[in-house]
Image: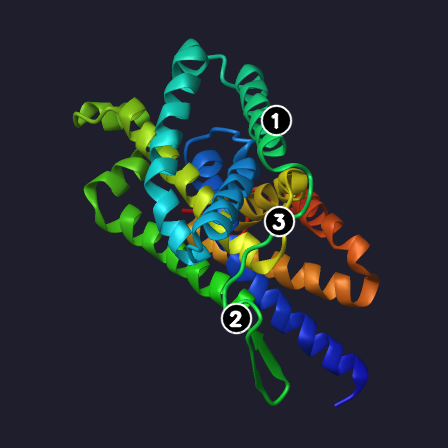
């Protein structure tokens, strides 16, 4: 096997592993932006918030990052519901959710980021766990657990949300409110309450993705900005409200970034998501999959 082929194989392998993590990072945007039409530009800030929760619990109490993921889920869900209530009463019920709502989430983004800087400073932080430095090698396949675990958790997260939205009454109500809120009212549903719960799930998924991120790499408070274009690109590329599309688009973005970083240099990798977003909007604005 030639050197270029080996590099390509390594890039494809890394991209697939990253793709599972990107699915975990982006599924919340698929819910908030794709299903609820809420442009939550602060979504990556909650990912970083989850990462620092994992860092604090790990450095202070020795709690495993994967356990912190479970600990943070319920408070994050409640936080998401509170944020939606604020958003609804301030903007959505007045029909001012476009520009004003976007400014609201920009404000949340900077509040979270500045709060983390005040608490933890601007240095990179990392967690300690025995599996972070463990790698399994099979022939040409190298499987670092710090990437395998986020892949598995990410795919399980998307699968759980898919089952929730397709097989439960509340989940189907979330799909209904994304398609026809008026019809939901006719059968006795409360669109505002349903959207509140759905947004809580969206924020919880972002916070859950945080410990996965800090398992992969050290983090600092402003690193969430790197994910703004990435998560929206994955959402649009996948078909906005399609969870299956989110997984496929995440894999595409992960592979494209890994190949670009391997052959073009890491500095070009962040441009991949924006390029895919622009191409999708130009060539297939409805995305690859439609619900």
- Note whether residue 187 is visible: yes
* Residue of label 2: 145
In the picture, the disc for residue 31 is none
Vertical position of residue 246 compared to residue 130: above or below: above
Seen as rendered, the residue at the extreme front is 60
Cα gap from disc 2 to disc 1, whole angstroms: 32 Å
Vertical position of residue 117 compared to residue 262: above or below: above
* Mark 1 Cα-neighbour bin, 10 Å: few <14, some 14–19, many ≥20: some
Q: SS at mark 3?
A: loop
Of marks 3 and 1, the one in the foreground = 3
9 to the left or right of 138: right
Q: Percent x, y for residue 182?
A: 29, 23
- Of label 3 and label 1, which has the lower sequence position? 1
- Of label 2 and label 3, which has the lower sequence position? 3
8 to the left or right of 96: right
Answer with the quarter of the image where residue 143 lies. Answer: bottom right
Q: SS at mark 2?
A: helix
Q: Nearer the viewer, residue 129 or 213?
A: 129
* Mark 2 Cα-neighbour bin, 10 Å: few <14, some 14–19, many ≥20: some
Vertical position of residue 111 compared to residue 168: above or below: above
Cβ atoms under marks 2 and 1 closer than 8 Å: no
Residue drawn at 30 percent across, 46 percent down: 165
- Note whether residue 180 is visible: no
In the picture, the disc for residue 110 is 1
Q: SS at mark 1?
A: helix
* Residue of label 3: 125
Q: Percent x, y for residue 98?
A: 54, 19
- Of label 2 and label 1, which has the lower sequence position? 1
Residue drawn at 41 percent across, 17 percent down: 86
Q: Nearer the viewer, residue 285 or 250?
A: 250
């Amino acid at each position: 096997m030639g050197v270029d082929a080996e590099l390509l194989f390594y890039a494809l392998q890394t991209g697939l592993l990253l793709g599972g993590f990107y699915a975990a990072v982006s599924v919340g945007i698929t819910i908030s932006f794709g299903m609820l039409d809420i442009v939550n530009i602060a979504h990556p800030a909650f990912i970083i918030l989850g990462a620092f929760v994992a860092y604090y619990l790990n450095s202070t109490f020795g709690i495993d990052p994967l356990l912190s993921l479970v600990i943070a889920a319920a408070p994050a869900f409640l936080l998401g519901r509170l944020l939606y209530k604020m958003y609804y009463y301030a903007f959505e019920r007045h029909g001012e959710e476009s520009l004003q709502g976007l400014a609201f989430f920009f404000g949340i983004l900077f509040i979270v980021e500045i709060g983390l800087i005040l608490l933890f400073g601007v240095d990179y932080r990392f967690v300690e766990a025995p599996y972070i430095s463990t790698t399994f090698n099979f022939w040409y396949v190298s499987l670092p657990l710090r990437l395998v675990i986020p892949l598995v958790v990410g795919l399980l997260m998307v699968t759980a949300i898919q089952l929730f939205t397709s097989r439960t009454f509340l989940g189907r109500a979330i799909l209904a409110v994304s398609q026809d809120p008026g019809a939901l009212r006719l059968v006795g549903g409360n669109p505002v309450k349903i959207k509140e719960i759905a947004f809580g799930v969206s924020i919880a998924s972002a916070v859950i993705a945080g410990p996965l991120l800090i398992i992969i790499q050290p983090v600092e408070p402003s690193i969430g900005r790197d994910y703004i274009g990435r998560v929206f690109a994955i959402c649009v590329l996948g078909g906005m409200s399609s969870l299956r599309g989110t997984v496929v688009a995440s894999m595409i973005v992960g592979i494209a970034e890994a190949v670009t970083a391997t052959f073009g240099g890491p500095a070009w990798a962040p441009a991949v998501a924006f390029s895919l977003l622009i191409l999708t909007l130009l060539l297939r604005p409805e995305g690859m999959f439609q619900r």
